[in-house]
Amino acid sequence: MSLWGKKDTVYSDGTIAISGTTVTGTGTTFNTSGLINEGDVITVGTGATYGEAVVSSVTNATTIVLKSADGLTGTVAAGAAYEITQKPISTIGDSNYSATEIFGVDTTEQSVATGDNSKYAPAHAGWVGISSYVDQHGVTRVKTEVLVASSSISEDAGDDQQLPDS
């Protein structure tokens, strides 16, 4: 298991429920997809409302076991949205960036953002933290930080509002 991978999105078909460290899917093909591996990060709920956890193993088409449920909050009832990525596991519970502020930025997204002088333009492709805040003068500012520089990020996630592909 590596500390991070290169896929912005690995898998997100169907919905899930979580009890303890057991993820139960509906409409999923976890083990038959061959995409999900130990060390991948699962972000649970729309906007990461339930938090994140690290995959320990994939049992079958409808069951994943998590290393720990410590990064999750509340009861995750059936029908929850989720996304599995290969983002750095060190970002779970990061006090600088929430789960929805860490992006896998491929070279095209980085190039387009830089070329458009986008306020979201990261200095390099890779795993990037992007947060917005309002300064003391009421001006919205955007902070970008390259967490892991990598030119091999792939599998685009739904981040095109901040980081368009073209």
Image (cartoon, grey):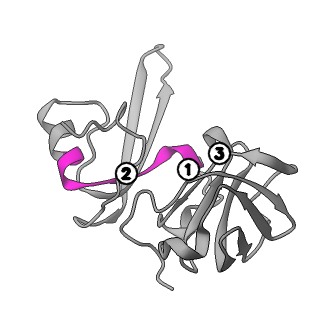
Tell me where residue 64 sits by quadrant.
Answer: bottom right
Decide: marks 2, 1 in contact (CB < 8 A)? yes
Q: Is residue 137 above or below residue 109?
A: above
Give how far across and how far down residue 76 sits, in percent: 82, 51
- Identify the residue position indicated by label 2 in the image: 145
Label drawn at residue 132? none
N-terminal of the two: label 2 or label 1?
1
Tell me where residue 69 sits by quadrant.
Answer: bottom right
Q: Is residue 59 above or below residue 114?
A: below
Q: How would you rate the neighbour count of disc 2 (Cα within 10 Å): few for under 14, some for 14-19, many for 20 or more? A: some
Any magenta on residue 109?
yes
Give how far across and how far down residue 16 sits, in percent: 73, 54
Give the total number of marks visible in the rendering: 3
Asked whether, in this view, residue 23 is left or right of residue 10, the answer is: right
Label drawn at residue 48? 3
Of residues 60 and 81, the one nearer the viewer is 60
